[in-house]
Every structure is written in C-alpha cells, then in structure tokens.
C-alpha cells in the first residue's frame, strides 16, 4: 500500500520551506532557530538563482566568467536580513502576525507526515511483498487536510443546547450571520418555541434566571424577535437536510456535535463547534471573537479533522430465513405451497418488522451512523450478557459480562475511556472493541483495523436478550439469533480545527480530561546518602569475599 508519506523527506522539507516563506508566518522558536531558518531561506533562494543563471549560459563559459558568476551568487546568498524584512514589511498587513497564527488553523507547515512511512518491501536477499495493483490506494496526509469551498457557502445550520447561558451568543451569532454575512440560517423548530424567546407569554421566573446571567433580557429577546421571520426551521425526524446545508455551527457541548452527526446520515457539512458546555472535548472554539473565526472558515482558512463514523445495521433472525426462502423461490413466478406456508409462518413469528421492499444495493434499511459508539448491554436483566463476536466472518470470542462497546477513535475518549480503553487520536483509522465489566480477568480492550466488519450476535445459549443503543439513542432489543453488523462508514464528520489536529486533541485531553495531571515531584537540593551507600557497598564487599575465597 502506498501513501503520500512515500515522498522523499528532503523534497518535502524543501516544499515546506517554500510554503513557509510564501505564508510569511512568524517564527516562534529561539534566536538560534531564527538564524538557522533565515540561513536556510537565503541558501534556498540563492540556489534557485544559481540554477536560472546556469541555464542562461552556455557550457563552454570561460573560467573568469564562471568565477564572476560564483562571486555574484555568493553576494546574493550573503545579502543582509534587512532586505527580506523590508520586503515583508511592504506587503505585511498584519494578517500573518503571531497573534493570527492560532486564528488561521492548520497553516503551520509540517516537515513530517502524520502517516507512517512506507515500509521497505524487500526482506532479505530473496523475499519481498507481492505487488497487487488492484489493492493499491493513496492515503492523504491528515496534517494536510484543509477545507476549501468550490462554491460560496450560503446556508448555515446553527445548533444550540437548551441552556439560558447560550441564548445571548446564539442571538449574536444569528444576527451577525443574517445581517453581515447575508446567509440563510436554519434552526430547529424547537428553538422558536423556547420559553425565553417567545413574545406571547410572560415568564417572570425564567426571565429572572436569564437576568442573573446576562442582565439585558428584554434587549436580547427583542433582537431575536426581529430576526424570527428570517430563519428557516426544520423538525428532527421529519425533514431531510441532505444537500440543503453548507455549513454547521454548534453552540454548546459535545452533545451538539453528536446531534449534528445524527441529523446527517450520509454526507455531513463542515462542522464548527464552539465551547459553551460543561466538558467541551469536541468543541475547540471560543465565542469571544466568533466573527473573526467564522470569517476565516468561510474564506477557506481552516484545517479539518475527519472523524470517522460507524455504520451499524441490525439483522433479525426471521429476515435471514425469509431471504433464503425468497432466493429459493426466485426461479419461478409462483411460490410453491410449502414455501408459501413457511413465509406465512415467518410473518406470524416476526410480526410487522419484516418489509418486502427490495434492496438492490445490499444496504439494510435500518442502518444508522454513529460518531461515538454503539453499546450492547444486558439492560434490566439480572443475568450476564452472552455475546458472540465475529470478525470478517471468523469467530473471535464470546463476551460474558455487562456488555460490549464498539467505538470510533473519537468515541475512545467517551464511554470506552470510562470502561478502561486506550484513547486513540481521531486521525488513526481503527475500531475499538471494549468489554463492559467482563467476567474474565484477561479480557482487555482491543483495536482492530478500520476496514473489517464486526458481527455481534446473541449466543443461542444466552439466558436473556440484550439491548443496543447508538450514541446513547435509538435503544432497541436484540433477541436470540439477531446480529448487529458494524463497519466503518465512508461518511466522516469533518470537524474544523482551531489550531491543528495534534494541538486540538492534546489541548482537549489536558483541559477537558486533565490527562496525566499530578503534583510535580520536588527536586533534591543535595545528593542523598542513599545514592552512595547501602546496596553498592554491600555488593563490593560480597565480590571481594568471592575473590578471596
């Protein structure tokens, strides 16, 4: 398998230097690094000039002209740093200063790919990997994933959490998008029914609570009522938003991003999440200067983290049996009497859950995409869950415990982390399988490749059925013989980064989960006697005794 990380590192480094020079980003290193970086730029520009000069001269140039040419190129290479600073000052408009570096997410050039380098494919003098051109694919470096608009975005979906503290930022954002950016704003219909924003009911208790946070309740309410008729509403579960939304803005916590993922079960528009919740692991942006940040995103200055999702489908026991019966009867126009009776028997056993609608693309009608995890648990039953796990049709193991979590790398910091799993960066293609309180001391969480298909079924000898939920929603029952199939979806959630993929994730670990936070151990002012006495002296004495003996 080949990928973009196969590019020679020297060529990649040279390309990054050119990109750095074109963007004119401020250097945040030490003085030594600043001098080294400027010297690299000067040498690189001088080498380009040498190549152009050499191409314009014939090969039989006299030695004196060659020395003059060499001295001229050396003079160009030793030009003072003030010329470069002067050229930058002439074109600098303050947009690329150090304070803007965080604002323009993803513009910091990297010299290494986030993908691992391609392995050496020859093993010893005789062995090597057999090449298969049909299985070769190209993988883009996650660090180079940036948002671009091939059409100007016109419609924006604003999702907010149900909290009085979010009302003021919500009204300010909607007002700015409508009046300044002239965009069509979509909101959920429940937003217009918010008690704090309705004009036909007097709410003293709610308004008093709102005044404790913002103070000017009447002003915020009047500003929203002036924009009410300009908003487009939708109802969850009834209206299809596919190909209607260009851009999504979330105001709240991580639940707003999960809700956006639920609304779009296929292609998801770019999502920009602002932190106005409690945890905020998936919301890297602050609302202090939202105008500047949203403008940069609309102009295409943003890095993306593609958060993979899982495609989950439930296959009932009666469905598989009826599919086999229909396949056996497909050769004739009329069903045989015994097959007709068997189909009726399946209908009576499974009720109205079976649908005779044709499915030509082999995609189940009940498939759902999840961003965090799909959870199979024992529900209210007092017995252990007994779940069989298959990977690409091969039986792997059985889970006896409270249940099982199948999560994405994004979901590895959610329920799976509480169950003892490792946290995985969202740019790593993988599926995480974590047991919930297994009745086995050796059952540890495992990470499998993202391209496999997991089949999870209730064991025939299980004492009870199980419950399955998708991102905490759509709770359903899995009966004996039913199975759940989980694969990686081709429709990720494009989450816009505040800085870049690496910085945002580790900042969330530190600020949201307080990862590896402990009190620092104090250093010793003087060397302790423990380092020079004790075991070492006794070992020397023991060696001397052995030599004398």
Image: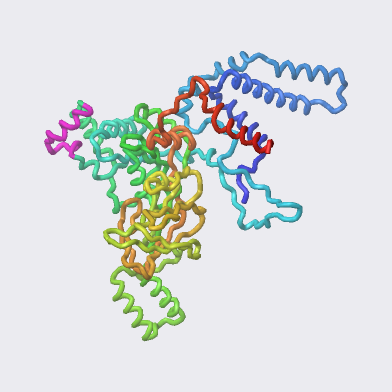
Q: Is residue 164 left or right of residue 517?
A: left
The magenta region covers: 195-214
**Foreground pick, 391 / 545:** 545
Q: Quadrant of the C terminus?
A: top right
In x, y percent, where is residue 442?
45, 55
In x, y percent, where is residue 205?
13, 34
**Foreground pick, 160 / 482:** 482
Which residue, as the protein is rendered here, is positioned at the far bottom?
337
Residue 63, placed above or below residue 497: above
In x, y percent, where is residue 24?
56, 24
Q: Is residue 43 magenta?
A: no
Scheme by which the image is coloured: rainbow
Q: Is residue 95 left or right of residue 208?
A: right
Which residue, as the protein is rendered here, is positioned at the far front?
549
Q: Is residue 199 magenta?
A: yes
In x, y percent, where is residue 540?
62, 32
């Amino acid at each position: 398998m080949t990928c973009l990380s196969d590019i020679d590192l020297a060529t990649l480094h040279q390309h990054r230097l050119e990109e750095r020079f074109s963007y004119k980003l401020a250097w945040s290193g030490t003085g030594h690094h600043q001098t080294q970086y400027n010297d690299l730029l000067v040498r690189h520009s001088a080498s380009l000039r040498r190549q152009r000069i050499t191409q314009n001269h014939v090969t039989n140039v006299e030695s004196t002209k060659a020395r003059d040419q060499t001295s001229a190129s050396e003079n160009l290479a030793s030009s003072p740093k003030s010329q470069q600073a002067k050229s930058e000052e002439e074109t600098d408009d303050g947009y690329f200063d150090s304070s803007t570096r965080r604002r323009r997410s993803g513009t910091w050039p990297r010299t290494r790919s986030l993908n691992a380098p391609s392995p050496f494919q020859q093993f010893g003098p005789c062995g090597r990997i057999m090449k298969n051109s049909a299985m070769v694919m190209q993988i883009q470096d996650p660090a180079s994933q940036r948002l671009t608009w091939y059409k100007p975005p016109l419609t924006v979906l604003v999702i907010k959490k149900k909290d009085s503290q979010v009302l003021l930022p919500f009204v300010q954002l909607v007002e700015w998008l409508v009046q300044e950016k002239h965009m069509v704003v979509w909101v959920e219909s429940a937003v217009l029914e918010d008690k704090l924003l309705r004009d036909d009911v007097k709410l003293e208790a709610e308004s008093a609570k709102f005044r404790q946070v913002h103070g000017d309740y009447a002003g915020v309410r009047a500003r929203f009522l002036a924009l009410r008729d300009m908003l487009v509403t939708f109802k969850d579960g009834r209206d299809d938003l596919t190909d209607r939304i260009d851009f999504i803005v979330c105001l709240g916590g991580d639940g707003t991003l999960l809700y956006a993922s639920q609304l779009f079960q296929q292609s998801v528009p770019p999502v920009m999440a602002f932190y106005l919740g409690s945890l905020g692991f998936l919301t890297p942006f602050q609302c202090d200067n939202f105008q500047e940040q949203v403008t940069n995103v609309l102009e295409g200055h943003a890095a993306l983290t593609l958060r993979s999702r899982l495609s989950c489908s439930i296959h009932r026991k009666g469905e598989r049996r009826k599919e086999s019966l229909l396949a056996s009867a497909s050769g004739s126009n009329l069903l045989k009497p015994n097959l007709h009776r068997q189909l009726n028997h399946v209908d009576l056993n499974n009720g109205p859950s079976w649908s005779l609608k044709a499915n030509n693309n082999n995609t189940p009608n009940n498939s759902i995409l999840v961003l965090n995890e799909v959870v199979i648990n024992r529900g209210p039953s007092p017995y252990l869950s007994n779940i069989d796990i298959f990977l690409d049709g091969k039986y792997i193991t059985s889970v006896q415990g409270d249940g099982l979590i199948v999560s994405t790398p994004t979901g590895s910091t959610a329920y799976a982390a509480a169950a003892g799993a490792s946290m995985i960066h969202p740019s790593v293609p993988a599926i995480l399988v974590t047991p919930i309180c297994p009745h086995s001391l050796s059952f540890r969480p495992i990470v499998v490749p993202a391209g496999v298909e997991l089949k999870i079924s209730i064991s025939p000898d299980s004492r009870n059925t199980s419950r399955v939920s998708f991102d905490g929603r759509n709770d359903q029952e899995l009966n004996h013989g039913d199975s759940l199939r989980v694969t990686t979806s081709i429709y990720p959630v494009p989450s816009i980064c505040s800085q870049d993929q690496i910085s945002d994730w580790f900042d969330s670990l530190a600020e949201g989960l307080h990862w590896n936070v402990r009190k620092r151990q104090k250093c010793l002012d003087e060397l302790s006697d423990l380092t020079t006495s004790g075991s070492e002296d006794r070992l020397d004495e023991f060696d001397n005794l052995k030599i004398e003996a």
